[in-house]
Image (cartoon, coloured by chain):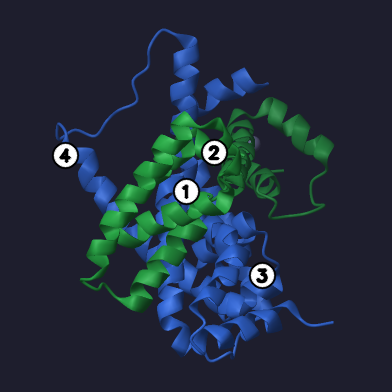
């Protein structure tokens, strides 16, 4: 049997043509098919790794903030509200640092809301790492 | 029992009637799957998350064009695949120029005497080669390959998304795997592929 047929079997393009034992025996003797076999298996691992990656927990908030922005459009008067937003976020940060009791009361939705507001008024995605790395967001 | 896609149609109808917040349910339901497809094209979590966001914003804007001839998810995945393909082409160009921008040289694999450093570098080189093989698939084969391997989509679902017959979809997937094998075989440099295998086994 030629290497070409073994290669087809390695890539799962043929089934039942070559037995597992025959294939393994060939792999022992043929370095080129062995390399393909290992590369194919590693490709499966790389794909499985990428596939198992989880989307950021903020994606929902990011999308809804963007959709909200598109739906409403940018209005000048919102800029005034943006100042209140900055104050609100800073208040949350300071309160979180000084009050453990407050940490308990800070639920997931409040955190998301603050991030939502940030996404709505700015395009700074770096806000995610800030929220991910601070203690308030942990439950 | 109600078909799950009929729920989607109800949600779409509510959004069209002005209830923007209902879009949230669609994002919740499909963001991970859209992200997985984006990963198949971009191989980077940040890039894939950004594109996932772009896809949903686009879907929201285009919801008026959705006629309901296909299910919402089929329509969503079509948009995802097209945007991801375009985005990966742009990214390829960007990465090409970025690669040459620092010192005008293409970075070569540097081997040191430290065997653990070697295997780490070589492992990464292998990963990059595999990603390149996926990226080299022709557009339709790449779409089929990604739907199948990154989303575990059935052949009949793939057929709807790709607007092909079941038989044509199966043939496309076969050609994608065959091409993937050919590309992988072309990349088989013993210097790169022998090391990790001895480490692994
Ligand atoms: Zn062989």
Q: CA distance from mark 4 to mark 2?
A: 50 Å
Of labels 3 and 2, the one closer to you: 2
Neighbour tally class for label 4: few under 14, some 14-19, many 20 plus, Cα within 10 Å: few
Chain letter for the blue part: B
Q: CA distance from mark 4 to mark 3?
A: 42 Å
| Image coordinates for residue A88, horizontal then vertical, percent | 37, 50
Marks 3 and 1 sit apart, C-alpha to C-alpha, by: 20 Å
Q: Secondary structure at mark 1?
A: helix
The reply to whether callout 4 and callout 3 are in contact (CB within 8 Å) is: no
Q: Residues within 10 Å of mark 1 (few under 14, many from 20)?
A: many
Image mark 2: chain:
A
Residue A72 shown left or right of residue B69 in the figure: left
Q: Secondary structure at mark 2?
A: helix
Task: Report whether A40 appears left or right of A70.
Answer: right
Q: Secondary structure at mark 4?
A: helix
The residue pinned by badge 3 equals B170
Q: Which residue is mark 1?
A: B133
Q: Which residue is mark 2?
A: A102
Residue at disc 1, CB closer than 8 Å to ligand 1: no
Which residue is most to the top? B113
Q: How far is the residue under mark 3 from the one under mark 2?
A: 57 Å
- Mark 4 and mark 3 lie on one chain; the one further toward the N terminus is 4
Q: Are marks 3 and 1 in contact (CB under 8 Å)?
A: no
Chain letter for the residue marked with disc 1 in the picture: B
Chain in green? A
Q: Residues within 10 Å of mark 3 (few under 14, many from 20)?
A: some
Dividing the image into four equal quarters, which quarter contains ligand 1? Answer: top right
Quadrant housing residue B165: bottom right
């Amino acid at each position: 049997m030629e290497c070409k047929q073994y290669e087809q079997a390695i890539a799962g393009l043929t089934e039942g043509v070559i037995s597992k034992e025959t294939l393994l025996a060939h792999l022992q003797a043929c370095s080129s098919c062995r390399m393909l076999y290992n590369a194919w298996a590693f490709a499966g691992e790389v794909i499985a790794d990428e596939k198992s990656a989880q989307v950021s927990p903020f994606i929902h908030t990011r999308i809804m903030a963007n959709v909200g922005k598109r739906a409403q459009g940018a209005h000048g008067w919102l800029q005034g509200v943006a100042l209140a937003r900055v104050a609100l976020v800073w208040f949350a940060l300071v309160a979180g640092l000084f009050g453990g009791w407050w940490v308990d009361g800070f639920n997931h939705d409040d955190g998301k809301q603050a991030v939502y507001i940030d996404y709505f008024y700015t395009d700074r995605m770096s806000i995610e790492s800030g929220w991910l790395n601070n203690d308030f967001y942990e439950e | 029992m109600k078909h799950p896609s009929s729920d989607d149609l109800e949600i779409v109808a509510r959004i069209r009637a002005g209830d923007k917040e209902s879009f949230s349910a669609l994002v919740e339901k499909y963001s991970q799957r859209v992200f997985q497809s984006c990963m198949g094209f971009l191989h980077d979590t940040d890039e894939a998350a950004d594109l996932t966001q772009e896809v949903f914003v686009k879907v929201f804007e285009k919801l008026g064009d959705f006629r309901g001839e296909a299910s919402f998810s089929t329509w969503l995945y079509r948009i995802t695949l097209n945007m991801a393909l375009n985005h990966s082409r742009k990214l390829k160009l960007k990465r090409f120029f970025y690669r040459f921008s620092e010192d005008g040289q293409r970075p070569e694999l540097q081997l040191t005497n430290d065997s653990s450093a070697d295997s780490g570098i070589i492992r990464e080189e292998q990963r990059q080669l595999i990603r390149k093989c996926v990226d080299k698939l022709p557009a339709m084969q790449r779409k089929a390959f990604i739907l199948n391997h990154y989303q575990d989509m059935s052949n009949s679902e793939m057929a709807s998304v790709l607007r092909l017959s079941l038989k044509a979809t199966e043939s496309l997937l076969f050609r994608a795997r065959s091409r993937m094998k050919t590309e992988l075989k072309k990349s088989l440099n013993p210097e790169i592929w022998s090391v990790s295998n001895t480490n692994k086994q």
